[in-house]
Amino acid sequence: MKNRKAYSIVLFTATALTPHLALAQDADTPEAQEAKAEDQTGLGDIVVTATRREARLQDVPVAVTAITGDALASADVSTVRTLTQVVPGFVGSRNMGVFQPVVRGVGSTGISIGDEPNIATYVDGVYQPESAANWIDLVEVERVEVLRGPQGTTFGRNATGGLINVITPDPSFNFRGKATARLGRMRNDAGDYDARFYVTGPLSDSVAADFAGLYRKNEGYITDLIRGGGLGDQRVIDLRSKVLFRASDALDIILTGEYFDQKGTTNSPQPLDGNTAGRRFAGVILPTDAWQASLTKEPTLDLKRYSAALHTRLDLGSVALDTTTGYMLLRWDQDTDSDASNIELGNFLAEFNVESISQEIKLNSADPGPFQWLVGGYFYQFGGNAFLQPWTAASPDLPLSGPTVEPELEGRSFAGFAEGTYELLSGLFLTIGARYTTETRNFTQQINGNVVVDDAEKTFNKFNYKLGVRYEFTDRTSVYATYSTAFKSGVFNMAAASATPVAPENIKAAEFGIKSDPLDWLRTNLSVYYYDYKDLQLQSKDAIGPSYILQNAANAEIYGGELEVFVRPVADLTLRSAVAYTHARYQDFPNAQGFFPRADGGNNVVTFDASGNVMTRAPKWSGNFGIDWGSDIGDGRIIFAGNLAWSSKVYYDFANIFSQPSYTLTNASVSWMPENERFKIGLWVTNLTNEKVLQTIRPGALGTDGFYEQPRKVGLSAEVRF
C-alpha cells in the first residue's frame, strides 16, 4: 500500500521534475507499475532524447531541463510559453500573437513569414516553424525537454540558442483515459474555464489509437475603459489524435493529426506610464493601473492551425531507421491598435497564410557498444503570403492612411548531419558531430498593388560542428565540456521593399557542466557557458509608423550558468530549485534603433550606439523553486504543490530605458484523492500575490505599450481517471 501511494505522488502531482523511467514494457503493465513503485525511495532516472537517442539525463552532455506532464499540470504550466516558471534561463516572451522564446539571452524578435524563432520547437520530432503557430497547449504530454545552448548538428534548424522538445505519449494497447476540469475566477469577476480529455486503447491486435481534446476559455479580465466590459478574452479548441499501426515486432507506423483554433482579444495593449501619442489630444483616456485598456476599437487575434505527421520506426537489428514527415497549414488574422489609446492615430491589420512540409530520415546504432552513432538527412519547404495595413494619422481629424503591403515568401532547405560518440577509455567519451545546410529563400513584394520586389532570391550555405568530451568519475558523477556552432539563415523582411535579406546570424559556444547524484535522494546539475554571437537579427518598430524594421546587430557576448538541485529525502516530499545567471551585452552595435520618450507622449526615434548595453529579454538573475508534499489521511491522500518563479529586471529596448522590474510569480494547489486513486479534487491559485508582470514591452514612435500576464486566479479542479 505504501509503495503504491508513493507512486501516486509522481503520477498526480509535483511541481518537481519527477522521473520518467526507462521501461521497455508498456507503462500500464503491472511490471512497469511495480518497477516505478520500487524506485520512489530515490529520484530515479529521467530518460530524455536530447541527443536524438534515448539516454539517461545524467549521461547526456547537454544542459537539459526535463519536466513530466503531471509536473507541468501541477505547476499550472499549460502552454510552452509558461515554461518560464519552471525552466532556468528561459523567458517566454510574445509580441501580439507571436511566441518569442528566449534561452540564455538568445531569442528572435521577428514576425515575418519564414522568420523562424532561433529557439526551435519540436513536437514528437516534428519541427514547428512559425512563431505564430507555436501557441502549443500541453494537453496530454509525456514530458517536455528544454535544451539550453546551440543544437546546430543533430537538431540543426534554427536552434541557435536551444530548443523546446515536446513529447506526447504514443497510443497504448491497454485502455485508459482521464478527464479534467478547472473553473477559476480573476479580476472583473472574469471566468476561467479549462476542460481536457484523453483516452487511448486498442482498435485491434495491431492497431491502437488515442484522442486528446482541450477546450480553454478565459473571459475579459482587462477593463475596457471605452466601451465597458472586458478585453483580453481568449477561447482555444485543440483536438489531437494518433493512430499506431504495429506492422510487426520491428516496424511501428504512427499517424498524427491536429486541429487548433484560437480566438480572442489578447492583443489589447496599454501604454506604459501613459506614454502614447494620443496624450497630445483632447479627449484622451489613459489607463491608470495594470489590466486596463483604452482603445479605438476592440482588437482581434484569431488563429487556426492544421497539422499532420507520419512517423515510422524500423528495427533492423544492429541499426534503427526512423522517418518523420510533418505538414502544417496556418491561418492568422489580427487587428491591433498601434497607439494604445482611444485617439485614432494608428492601427495594424495583418492577415497571414503559411504552409510548410518537412521530412527527416535518421539511421542510428541500436546495439550497445563503445561507438554510438547516427546519420540523417533533412528537407524543409515553406510558402506563404500576407496582407498588411500599417496605417497611421497625424491627428484624429485625419483618416488613417498608409500603404497596403502584400508580400509573398517561400523557401526550401536541405541538410545532412552525423554525430558519433566513442568510449576512448573506461568512462571517457568523445563526441564529434557535423551538419551541412543549404537554404534558398525567395521574396516578392507588392505595395499598393504595385510589384516593388520581383522574386528576389538568396541562398545560404553553412557547415556547423560540435566537439565534446565527457568523463564519468563514478556511476553517479560526470563532467562534460563542449564546443559547438549554430546558425540561422538570412531572412527577408515582409514589411519592407528591400530585395536584400538580413545576413545570417552565427553563434560559437563553449560549455562546461557537472552532473552528479551524490546521494539517492539528491541531484545537482551545474552548467557554465560562453557565447560569441554575431550578426544578430533584431526587429523594432518603424520610425514613422506601426510597421517593423529588421536589421543585423553586429555582435554580442553572453556568458553565465545555471544550477539545478533536486531533493527527495522521503517518499512524501520532493523539492526542486534552480538559479540562472546571464551576462548578455551587445558589442559593436552603432546603428541601433532607439526610442526616447517625448514630454507630450510618444517617442523620438534616434539611431544611437547600443554597444555595451544589456540585451533585451535577458534578466541577469532568474530562478524557481518547487515543492511537492503528500500525506495519507484516512482512506485517501492529501497533496500540496507549490511553485515560485522569480526574475531580476528585464529590458525590452536597445537603449535600456523600458523594463519590467524584478518580480516573483507564485502558484499553489492542494488536492485530495481517495485510496483507489480514481479521482482527485482540488483548490488552486495562480499569481498568488497578484504581481503585475509584463509579457512584453513594445516601444515605437506612437508610444510604448505592453501586455501583462494574467492577474491572480483562484479556482476548483476535478480529475477522473479510468
Image (cartoon, rainbow, N blue to C red):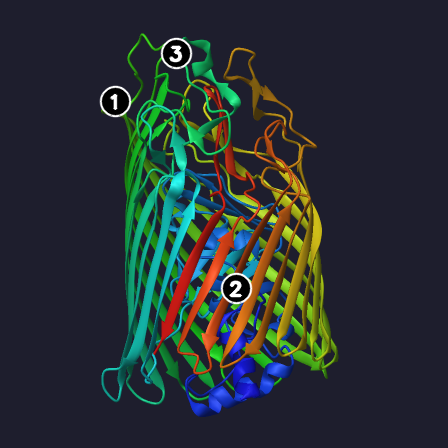
Q: CA distance from mark 2 to mark 1?
A: 58 Å
> Which-is-in-front pick, marks 2 and 3?
2
x and y, in percent, of residue 112 in the image: 39, 38
Q: Secondary structure at mark 3?
A: loop
Mark 2, Cα crowd under 10 Å, few <14 / some 14-19 / many 20+, is many
Residue 38: image x %, image y %?
58, 88
What residue is disc 1 on? 448
| Position above or below: 560 against 405 | below
Q: Is residue 152 visible?
A: no
Q: Image check: 34 left or right of 218?
A: right
Q: Which residue is mark 2?
A: 670
Name the image quarter holding residue 573.
bottom right
- Residue under label 3, please give it: 283
- Please name whichever residue, 498 or 102, is drawn nearer the observer in this view of the structure: 102
Residue 57 point in image, percent of width and height: 60, 72
For mark 2, give the secondary structure.
Answer: strand
Spatial separation of the CA atoms under disc 3 and disc 1? 33 Å
